[in-house]
Image (cartoon, rainbow, N blue to C red):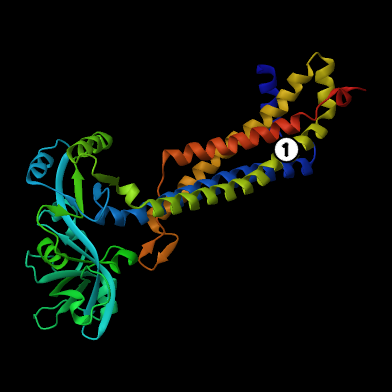
Amino acid sequence: MKFSYYIAKRYLFSPGSSNAINIITGIAAAGVVIGAMSLFIVLCGFAGLKDFSLQFSSYFDPDLKLFPASGKTFAFTDSQKEKLANLEGVASFSEIIEERVFLEFKDKQKTGFIKGIDANYKNVIQTDSIIFAGEWLTGNDAQVVAGFGISRELGMGVEQIYTNFLNIYVPKPGKGIPKDPSKAFRKKTAVNTGIYTVNEDLDKKYIFSTIGLARDLLKIPEGFVTNIELKLSPDVDEEDIKEQLQTLFADQVIIKNRIQLNDTLYKMLNTENLASYLVITLIAIIALFNVAGAIIMMIIDKKSNIKTLYNLGATLPKIRAIFLLQGSLMTILGALLGLLLGFIVIVCQQQFGLLMITPSLPYPTKITVVSFVLVFFTITVIGIVASLLASSRINQKLVSF
């Protein structure tokens, strides 16, 4: 192997006997470098885009959220509250009442969801991070905080003076069509004191209110909630907390973490990432098979040398190993150089914003160890396979006189 490696290194760094061979080898090496650099940039770009897309959910979604296993509500007794408050690993929790409602402001209407929260909600979610205008709820049952999308569609701003009220309707339970439509709904009026913004979908979906307003509107009795949202302590075992919660609520709840709450978004981002990786890998395969072409041309160029080595006692496997190692070295060095160039491009993007989404927002990128390993492994494997195919062209007929 030392013999084959020595000859392969000489062949790789020594110019060929003709300019055509040198040009072909240079193109093959450039293809490896560009393939590795492109794949690394794409993976870093999607890693940054994924973090950028999911950072908004960290402002709005709790670490864990409890849903009723059946129906719309579940019991949450004082005893369970005390045990949950003392549960190690749970930093804070908030009781939630959530339901679809019909909203009316002046002459405009819209459907949405009311999310009634208790005073502890600000310890679970960073409400200061999502408030856009006005102020957060102060505990007054006549106040709501609407999403930016809802506010825009209803033409509703932040009311400093309580003159313009938002009407909130929910249908009363029952059968048949009531004779008096005005009695088919429960109604509450409130003043919009703030506007929050998270993302386009959530901004059009929720209005926040006190849990008292939501409970009274929906006629949900004390001791029942639709959800419980939890903030966990750092470095806590999430699965252990889930098991303890299921025991506490006697398996009457479904528990979801932040990823499960946004499973559609995660699946979409992961699918896009995989699709882009496969497309760039396909391009890299095409580029890296230039390595096979370069090795074959090198074999033709060094045909006389190969015969000499064979006559001196080198076996066919050792001669094949020379060109396999030459192609492998070209691939490994090209992959390392491509990773270095890709790293420089990503650092420049992070520092100077070479590519901008908006005039004030650079395209997000994130450098990860996984990106380095995946690119190096992908390029190296493809290059070695291409070199193996090319070196297999050396046979007894080639070295025979």
- Which residue sits furthest bottom? 107
Q: Quick check: can you spot residue 30? A: no
Answer with left or right where residue 93 lies relative to residue 251. left
- Residue furthest right as drawn: 401
* Front one among 367 and 152: 152
Quadrant assignment, res 49? bottom left
Mark 1 element type: helix
- The amino acid at mark 1 is Ala
Q: Nearer the viewer, residue 187 or 228?
A: 187
Above/below status of 149 relative to 246:
below
215 sits left or right of 326 in the view: left
Q: Residues within 10 Å of mark 1 (few under 14, many from 20)?
A: many
Locate residue 106, reporting x and y percent: 21, 85
Residue 20 is situated, as x and y percent measured from the top left of the image, at 78, 44
- Where is residue 319 drawn, in percent x and y? 76, 22
The image position of residue 290, as x and y in percent, is 71, 43
Quarter residue 171 falls in: bottom left
Question: Which one is nearer the viewer's eye here, 305 or 115?
Answer: 115
Q: Residue at x 71, y 25 (%)?
A: 322
Residue at 79% over, 20% down: 316
Question: On the picture, is 52 further left or further right than 164?
Answer: right
Which image quadrant: the N terminus?
top right
Q: Is residue 28 visible?
A: yes
219 in relation to 29, above or below: below
Above-or-below relation of 35 to 143: above
Quadrant for the C terminus in the image: top right
Q: Which residue is mark 1?
A: 292
User: Most extreme residue toward the top, as rendered?
Assistant: 313
